Amino acid sequence: MAAAFRVRGSARLSGSILPQGAKNEALQILSAVLLTDQKMTIHNVPNILDVNKLIELLGDLGVEVQALGGDSYTFCAKQIRMDYLHTTDFMKKATALRGSVMLAGPLLARFGLAYMPRPGGDKIGRRRLDTHFIGLEMLGAGLSHDMALNCFKIEAKSLKGAYMLLDEASVTGTANIVMAAVLAQGTTTIYNAACEPYLQQLCSMLVRMGAKIQGIGSNLLTIEGVNGLQGTEHRILPDMIEIGSFIGLAAMTGSALTIKEVCYDQLGIIPAQFRRLGIGFERRGDDLYIPAHEHYEIESFMDGSIMTIADAPWPGLTPDLLSVFLVVATQAKGSVLIHQKMFESRLFFVDKLIDMGAQIILCDPHRATVIGLDRSLPLRGMRMVSPDIRAGIALLIAALSAQGESRIDNIEQIDRGYQNIDQRLNALGAQIERITE
């Protein structure tokens, strides 16, 4: 049955909210449990569709999964069913989940064989896998296309360390290569490696498991291969994308909110970029307090030119938050150019905001100019469809700030990345009803 949100806008929210565990980190960390036959204990696992699908897939592979209550799990990958990899059931489930690509590195490192179907996920433009394949091939893996299963087969009798300069700082590509390299023979050097906090978390966990990794937090990683890894315990960071979404929600709805336990030092440039939109907040220990904003004004550059907010590899701004920045700018005073460099289809949801009354010029697939209305013309409620996870939360923020009632269809996209979002926001005073038809 199809599910939708019915949203009554214009409500002021108040109170505090605790961010969920980070989706992007969870997908890496859960894939890494395949690297050892010992027990792994993972805390702060988000209860969202993409993560739950990966946990189910691990169970199908033979991983012993035990829910400890709350957001904690244990995993033990002692007996892996390698025959399951070339079944239509595996292909179907893995294709529906983009995070399944990160199973390849651990499986290849420990068992010498992996299958990588063409992954699903958001329809936000090209998301090539070249970095994954090139890196694994440089470690000694052979790549072929399985015509019967329509997937890529990756195999290696043994992996050997190598020097590689990645053609892009792919987060999932770097994670896959690192997870393969920790069990390879010799030294692997990865230059232009991704260095997001989630990748740092993965590397730090692998070190606690017995891996030898130098350069964590930089774009130059040096890995000395080891013969085996042991189990460990790990806690996933709070989701910086959800934290940014809540900052934007508070500003758009003129609400005073406290976001709890944000791990502020791991948020990077995100707080500074919100300040550029005129959004102020207070750091209270490890909490963020966002006061109610009746108005907020976009800064200009020092030479007076229009502000540009663009995504970039870490420590630049994550592309996952640009949809939120765009919708928040619609009610600011001033104008801003949103430049989405990485994905050419991620801005195509702006037509829905324009229909709601926003003033946005879509320059091309990568750039949109937003003329802020300074709340002089509130958005209007309407019916719309969520095209992907991040556009979905941006549309939900728009609907909560709009006059009248909105309906958002295809909310499975939102559920893929945001845990019980309707219940959690309703606890703050939002009016969101989940309906099924």
Image (cartoon, rainbow, N blue to C red):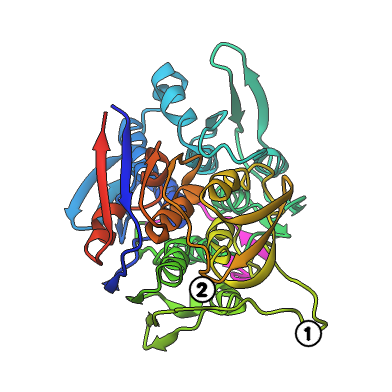
Q: Tell me residue 120's x, y (percent).
A: 52, 33
In the figure, residue 235 lies in which quadrant?
bottom left
Q: Which residues are magenta?
A: 213-230
Q: Is residue 23 left or right of residue 200?
A: left
Question: Which residue: 45% across, 83% down?
Answer: 281
Q: Tell me residue 380's x, y (percent).
A: 45, 52
Is residue 225 covered in magenta? yes
Q: Mark 2 is on which residue type?
A: Leu
Check the picture and name the quadrant holding the N terminus. top left
User: Looking at the image, is mark 2 or mark 1 nearer the viewer?
Assistant: 1
Residue 219 visible within the image: no
Q: Tell me residue 201's x, y (percent).
A: 48, 65
Q: Nearer the viewer, residue 290 or 25?
A: 290
Whether 9 is drawn above or below 146: the answer is below
Q: Secondary structure at mark 1?
A: loop
Question: In the rendered structure, which disc, 2 or 1, sits on the residue that comes first in sequence?
Answer: 2
Please name the residue that numbered disc 2 is placed on: 267
Check the picture and name the quadrant holding the C terminus. top left
Q: Mark 1 is on which residue type?
A: Met
Q: Secondary structure at mark 2?
A: loop
- Distance from label 2 to label 1 (Cα)? 25 Å
Q: Is residue 41 left or right of residue 237?
A: left
Residue 278 visible within the image: yes
Q: Nearer the viewer, residue 263 or 287?
A: 287
Q: Tell me residue 109's x, y (percent).
A: 54, 42
Please name the residue that numbered disc 1 is placed on: 302
Is residue 379 covered in magenta? no
